[in-house]
Image: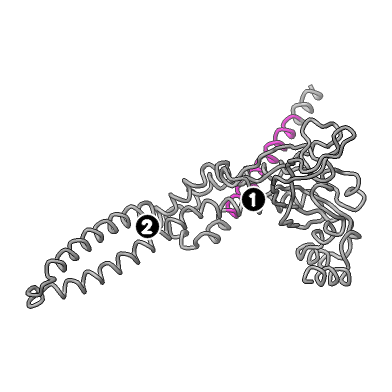
Amino acid sequence: MKNALERLTLFAKSRLSHFAARNAQQRRREQRTTQAVERLVDQVNPRLRAASGYRKRLSPVVERALEHAKALAHRVPGPLRIDRRTWNEDPVVNALFGRPDRMRWVLTSNEVRRYVKENPLGGDCFAVLAVMPAVRQQLGMELMGETLQRDVRQTAVSFAEHQVLLAAESEGEARDALADGAFELLVSLAEQGITEQESRIVESEDRLRILRLKRKVADSRSHGAALLLDDSAEQLQELHALDTRIGEVEAELAEARKGLESLDERLARLIERLEHPEALLGLQEGSVRLDRMNIVREGDDSSAELSFTRVLRGEKPMRVVFLIHFPRSELLDEEERLREVERHLA
């Protein structure tokens, strides 16, 4: 009887502990969502807080956007080690940077320098590397058998516009920062459509104001003695044309204002845009076989097959991204950096 009572007590304590942990996790999730809602409102328009039930209405789509951003951050490949040794040995690192000195220049970004200055003690730096790929056709030389062929058509891949962002102490911190950045980008993309609509409203209002001013001037010329002039028919025709155009622009303005005539409607439009975060921001995996000169060599076993993950904004491919880590010794010191600046300027 005593053993049964002890087992029952242990079971009850285990269940209570489980429920307590689950409740604590739920509270943390709700707190995170609430904080993200407030970040979103601050980023988009603080006046949205005047909309009825803004926090309750935003919470479901914000939580979905947070989960999507977190999933994207964990799908980014890496961490890829970048240093002079891997530039020689790793075909991905070699493809991303044409020269080791170029690699070191890229790593010594303003953000990395600021991070190192604020955290002078530590090991490898972790960060996100974003690069823009470009494919071009060119004529080159190739060895076919024992014959060197000239003017052979080749496909070359290059990488430019390197950016090293979100420097951190660990992979976990870097991915968390990437998830936060992805969420803010999702909000910006959702807001972008609304901002474009607001720009159309302003443009239509400006056109309507100018047309009404022209109508007022034309109307003043079409009264009294002005009608006795030879061009009175032309003036009446001008009035009719202006009236027609004013009506068209008024219709355009009414259409542009739909969904944005009040804070509640604006909030509803933002929620609608955020309901499907995967349509706003995604990742696309791909691969290509490249030789050491970044020439495409499909079906050539002497080349290396490289995998890349590219950011998608809607359906538009953007930059290739990697999570990277590198030793601080790869960073240029101040004297080296100044020499590189002078070289670039020259």
Name the image quarter holding the C terminus: bottom right
Q: Where residue 110 appears, x then y in whole percent?
A: 76, 66
* Image point (91%, 53%), residue name: 84
Task: Please say whether residue 335 is one of the residues in the magenta stretch.
Answer: no
Horizontal placement of 340 versus 249: left or right? right
The residue type indicated by label 2 comes to Ser
Label 1 and label 2: CA atoms lie apart by 28 Å
Q: Is residue 14 above or below residue 25?
A: above
Q: Where residue 310 appears, x then y in whole percent?
A: 68, 44
* Image point (47%, 51%), residue name: 270
Magenta segment: 11-36
Q: Which one is in front, 124 or 13?
A: 124
Element type where label 1 sits in the image:
helix
Q: Quadrant of residue 211?
A: bottom left
Q: Quadrant of residue 19?
A: top right
Disc marking residue 182: 1
Q: Which residue ends up furthest to the top in the rendered image? A: 1
Q: Which one is in front, 98 or 61?
A: 98
Disc marking residue 262: 2
Pointer 1 or 2: first along the chain: 1
Q: Where residue 202 appears, x then y in whole percent?
A: 39, 63
The answer to whether residue 289 is seen in the rendering is yes
Task: Please say whether residue 20 is one of the residues in the magenta stretch.
Answer: yes
Q: Residues within 10 Å of mark 2 (few under 14, many from 20)?
A: few
* Image point (39%, 52%), residue name: 265
Q: Quadrant of residue 215?
A: bottom left
Q: Which one is in front, 149 or 63?
A: 149
Q: Is residue 115 above or below residue 18?
A: below
Name the image quarter holding the N terminus: top right
The residue type indicated by label 1 comes to Ala
Horizontal placement of 300 versus 52: left or right? right
Q: Main secondary structure of the magenta part?
A: helix
